[in-house]
Structure formats: structure tokens, C-alpha cells
Image (cartoon, rainbow, N blue to C red):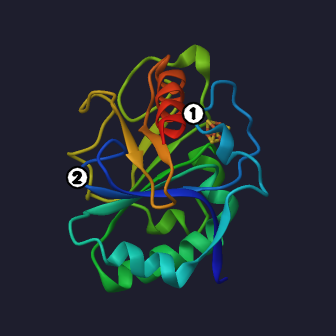
Amino acid sequence: MRTLRLYQTACPVYTLGPFARYGIWVQGCQKRCPGCASPLAQPLDGGYEADLVTLCERILCEPLIEGITISGGEPFLQSEALYVLVDELRKRRDIGVIVYTGCSFEEIAKDPLTGLCDAIIDGNYIQELDDGRALRGSSNQRLACLTERYRHTIGFGSFRRTTELLSTKEGKLSLVGIPGKGDVQAAEGLRRFWIERD
Ligand code: SF4
């Protein structure tokens, strides 16, 4: 398993967990949730193939990050490749791992990738249940702290819901974090303004 299909990566990210993080958005999700904040990450054949060794070295070159957050797209559609990446990172540095998945925790409990995570936020996005809380899109989503690492620093009430407009490692402008209602359209307008301006 040498590659991972990615939508985008960005660093540092401050809106998807505590401390500075390396954000990894995998490509491909079949849930098709109405109101999904990352519709371009849904097609299974979109994005690009990233070499795992190169990605691993890029992450390890970031001195200030405390950990990584993996989102998407659906991370557990590529859990074998992510396991290889996270396992290698963990062997070389004490890196915290947070994963967002559209699967339920029960569905992925036995996946080896789950065993490498410090925290998982589960469940697909349900627009009608969007309650504006930090770190989750809708109230059906649950936080599972699988180690002690984030037990006191992560929670749906311990942060304000915020987003960042970041330049990704792939050279795009992207809205990162958990967007509020209207944020996605506002960010798309801003992104187009900058592209047309150039
Ligand atoms: S599970 Fe997440 S990435 Fe997949 S369609 Fe739903 S909101 Fe989008």
C-alpha cells in the first residue's frame, strides 16, 4: 500500500481539534449527505494519488504541529493506507490522531486504524440536526476519546465553531473547519473573487 487518494492537505490547521494540526482530507465518500461541506471530496475517482512516504515526510517536517486530523471524504474507505501512514508517523514522533468519519463508531470499532486513533468523531452529517456546536456538523455525531490524550482538551462545548480560509498544500483556497450555515457559500464567493482577481 504505497498511495492514498487525497482531496487536499493543509497546515497549520487550528479548527479541527486542539493545538496546531496537519489536516488531511481524503478523497471519496459514498454517503452523499445533503449540505456536505466537502462535496468535491465525494467522487471516488477525484483528487489525486499521494505517495505515502512523501506525505509522511511532509508531516514530520512540520515542527509545530501536535497532531493530525484526518477528514474527507471517508477515511475508512482507505483505512489500510491510512493505517500505514499513521503507524509510520507514530513510530517516529509522538503525534496525536483525530479522525472524522461518516461511519458509526460501531461499524469501524474493529478496524485496525481505529486502534491508532486518539479520538474519533463519528456519523454522517444531517442538515436538520445542525446545532452549531463546535467540532461537529450535527448532533447525531459522537466523540469517542480512545486514549487519554485529548480527554480534557476536546469536546463539542469546549470550542467555538470556527472556520479558517486557508491556502492548501495543493495551492487552492479552502474553507477549513466546521462551517456554519452560509459559510460555505460565503467562502466560495471569496475564493472566486481571489481567482478572478489574479
Ligand atoms: S459523510 Fe461527510 S464527507 Fe461524506 S457526504 Fe457526508 S458530510 Fe460529506
In the displayed structure, 145 sits above or below 122; it is: below
Q: Residues within 10 Å of mark 2 (few under 14, many from 20)?
A: some
Pick the residue in front: 147 or 63: 63
Instruction: List x then y, in percent, for residue 72.
Output: 58, 49
What residue does disc 2 label?
Answer: 19
To which residue does mark 1 refer? 37
Left or right of 157? Residue 98 is right
Ligand 1's quadrant: top right
Image quarter hosting the N terminus: bottom right
Task: Look at the image and tell me whether residue 72 can be seen.
Answer: yes
Q: Say whether residue 187 is left or right of residue 33.
A: left
Q: Establish if 9 lies above or below 35.
A: below
The x, y position of residue 56, in whole percent, is 45, 78
**Image position, residue 167 (x, y; %):** 41, 50
* Residue positioned 21% across, 66% down in the render: 64
Q: Which of pointers 1 and 2 indicates the residue nearer the eye?
A: 1
